[in-house]
Image: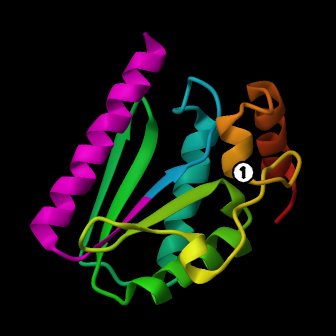
Amino acid sequence: MVIESIMLAREERYFRQRSLLKTFKLSLITYSVNFPGSNKNTELAHFIFSSGLADFEKAGIIYVYREIRFSPAGPGAYFIVDAEPLQLKQKLIALEESCAYGRLYDFDLFKPDGSLISRRDLSLPPRKCLICNGDWVVCRKENRHSTKELLAAIEAIHEKPS
């Protein structure tokens, strides 16, 4: 039942993204936390999410609309921005790579037409896994690491002085 509610919440996020893109006809940044397991709404997940919002604000990215939602898939935010997409993606990557919890932030950028801008579009390597430093997407899709291992890695990041 929990997995079904997470999947339904992810589907709702997708439709909200499409609605915002259609309404504003500008680029869309989505933000969530890479948090393993079926409970995406732990105190730590919300702390990391709040840290990401604060880091986003400090980065000085100007947005015309912001929306924050909480669901079984975890906390999430939407930002509508009127900026050049590739430069904006570079800022988001810098944010993910320079902040204390940046490896746990998941900022995605969609152009007004709904297409996703990836690290590959900037000729950058994929994000690294928290455990083995391999390709994060591959590790996640192949379930190479247990939830317990991933949570331990997140706790280690949280306990490390910044």
Examine the rendering and report whether any part of residue 43 can be seen: yes
Quickly name the residue at label 1: 136
Q: Is residue 4 above or below residue 36?
A: above
- The image position of residue 15, as x and y in percent, is 23, 45
Q: Quadrant of the C terminus?
A: bottom right
Residue beneath the point at 67% across and 63% down: 102
For this rendering, which residue is in front, 139 or 90? 139
Classify 10 Å Cα crowding around label 1: few (below 14), some (14-19), many (20 and above): some
For this rendering, which residue is in front, 134 or 149? 134
Which of the 4 image quadrants contains residue 65? bottom left
For this rendering, which residue is in front, 6 or 162? 6
- The image position of residue 5, as x and y in percent, is 38, 21
Q: How many discs mark residues in the rendered view?
A: 1
Examine the rendering and report whether any part of residue 61 can be seen: no
Q: Is residue 1 above or below residue 83?
A: above
SS assignment for the magenta stretch, majority? helix
Q: Is residue 77 left or right of residue 121?
A: left
Q: Residue furthest top?
A: 1
Q: Which residues are magenta?
A: 1-30
Q: Is residue 52 left or right of residue 116?
A: right
Q: Quadrant of the N terminus?
A: top left
Residue beneath the point at 56% across and 62% down: 52
Q: Mark 1: which amino acid? A: Trp
- The image position of residue 14, as x and y in percent, is 30, 46
